[in-house]
Amino acid sequence: MRSSLLRSVKTLAKPTAARGFSSESVPDRKVAVLGAAGGIGQPLALLMKLNPLVSRLTLYDIANTPGVAADVSHINTRSEVAGFVGDDQLGQALEGSDVVIIPAGVPRKPGMTRDDLFNINAGIVKSLCTAIAKYCPNAIVNMISNPVNSTVPIAAEVFKKAGTYNEKKLFGVTTLDVVRAKTFYAGKANVNVAEVNVPVVGGHAGITILPLFSQATPKANLGDEDIKALTKRTQDGGTEVVEAKAGKGSATLSMAYAGALFADACLKGLNGVPDVVECSFVQSTVTELPFFASKVRLGQNGVEEVLGLGPLSDFEQEGLEKLKPELKASIEKGIKFANEN
């Protein structure tokens, strides 16, 4: 998937490179980015403008979106760009969308956990999802706003109340955990990062992030301590960036890249490309929890199949049992918020 997107970026004027689609046969697809003027939203808007599968790109935020839209609209790629600002223009931004990406919200600061963001971001997500239910109820929704472990259940409850909920079209974007796991594994194993695959399951915060390095390919003979250290670094990747930026931001560029990767996968699935598989936080029966991140096969209906966990090492099985109570609490917190506010 990483190399697929990079190939798309390198051949911006040649939509024929997008997995065999000719410029005439690539379906029209509208993508809306909600929170497009923010730290994640701006680079995400750029990357979606570079994607030849996008024909219309709408950018929405509470301020500054017209400038961002004007800026990226000058890039000589396929999609037409429009910027919308404020509550009264949200409907216009959403109408007709095939994919809606939500990076809206406040970023994490030093000392903050993802859970500290909850009260602010939960309200933002609820408001935006209420509008999605009204203006583009059939769109695929990619939730980036943290804490994802809670914001996805909030979105599900909002859609249920509106009578528009489709569990196949609501995704929590956990791709950054996969991106980090691949990068860190490749560095430690001294293998080509472009060839690495590492499933990451569970949730999208702290110990709920469980990289399955026992299933990583290509195989590398790493010791138990190396695996533990790689797991911890993947779980703490967001904190690593927050601390490195010394109070001036969180993971914005890498998150935008990960968000663009996952949106690209959703678009390919919609367009009928076979065997598109990514990890995502979705409604699931893989465990006893109602939502869980695992490998998901994407298709024209969104989720075509939620794949099982596969064989786990003893260390991973232990990690799975440890994460369940925390993930359960986060899910319940989101459901409670949606139903009480």
Image (cartoon, grey):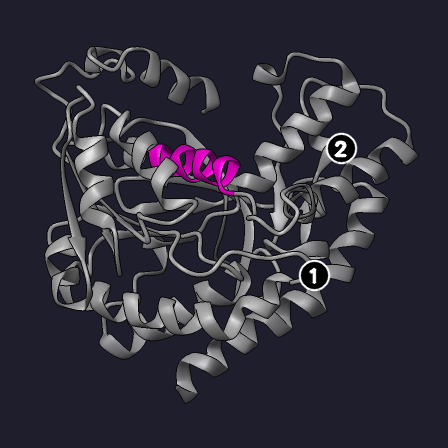
Disc 1 residue type (three-letter): Gly
- Viewport quadrant of the N terminus: top left
Write down the quadrant of residue 12 in the picture.
top left
Structural crowding at the residue carrying mark 2, measured as other residues with C-alpha within 10 Å and reported as few (<14), some (14–19) or many (≥20):
some
Q: Is residue 166 left or right of residue 78?
A: right
Q: In the structure shown, which secondary structural element does the residue marked by tag 1 occupy?
A: loop
Expressed as whole percent of the image width and height from the top left, the position of residue 64 reads 25, 51
Kindly identify which residue carries mark 1. Answer: 111
In magenta, the rendered stretch is: 252-266
Most frequent secondary structure within the magenta stretch? helix
| Vertical relation: 319 (above or below) 193 | below
Residue 20 highlighted magenta (yes or no):
no
Q: Kindly identify which residue carries mark 2.
A: 214
| Left or right for 153, reference 215 | left
Question: Can you see residue 304?
Answer: yes
Question: Percent x, y for residue 43?
Answer: 38, 36
Mark 1 packing: few (<14 Cα in 10 Å), some, or many (20+)? few
Residue 273 location in percent, x, y? 30, 26
Between disc 2 and disc 1, whose residue precedes?
Answer: 1
Amino acid on which the number 2 mark rests in the picture: Ser
